Image (tube, rainbow, N blue to C red):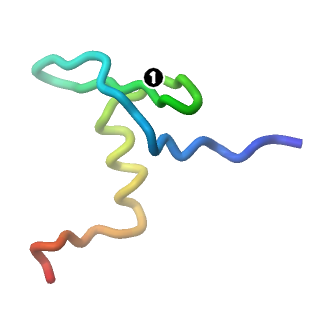
Amino acid sequence: MTQPACPHKRTQLIAKDNDAQYVECLDCGEILEAGEMEKKEGAGFDESLSDA
């Protein structure tokens, strides 16, 4: 039986340069580019509070 994918809700910044930011998931330990997480999270909802 496979476990569901980690939602990467708890992260910490581990590296940053002019082009990218890298974070580590505190739950599963995966290293991610911060831009990848924004694309996944924004897939279902693309409004901000300024649109209200």
Q: Is residue 15 left or right of residue 28?
A: left
Residue 27 x %, y %: 56, 32
Q: Quadrant of the N terminus?
A: top right
Residue ranking furthest to the bottom: 52
The structure residue drawn at horizontal position 40% and vertical position 61%, both measured from the top left corner, is 43
Picture layout, residue 2 above or below residue 44: above
Q: Quadrant of the C terminus?
A: bottom left
Residue 14 x %, y %: 31, 18
Residue ranking furthest to the right: 1
Q: Amino acid at mark 1?
A: Ile
Mark count: 1
Q: Is residue 13 left or right of residue 44?
A: left
The structure residue drawn at horizontal position 10% and vertical position 73%, both measured from the top left corner, is 50
The structure residue drawn at horizontal position 35% and vertical position 59%, both measured from the top left corner, is 42
Q: Is residue 2 left or right of residue 14?
A: right
Number of residues whose C-alpha sits closer than 10 Å to that of mark 1, classed few (under 14), some (14–19) or many (20 or more):
some
Q: Secondary structure at mark 1?
A: strand
Report the residue marked by disc 1: 31
Picture layout, residue 21 above or below residue 39: above
Residue 25 x %, y %: 47, 30
Closer-to-camera residue (25/37) = 25
Q: Quadrant of residue 28?
A: top right
Residue 34 x %, y %: 31, 34
Picture layout, residue 25 above or below residue 39: above
The structure residue drawn at horizontal position 45% and vertical position 22%, both measured from the top left corner, is 31
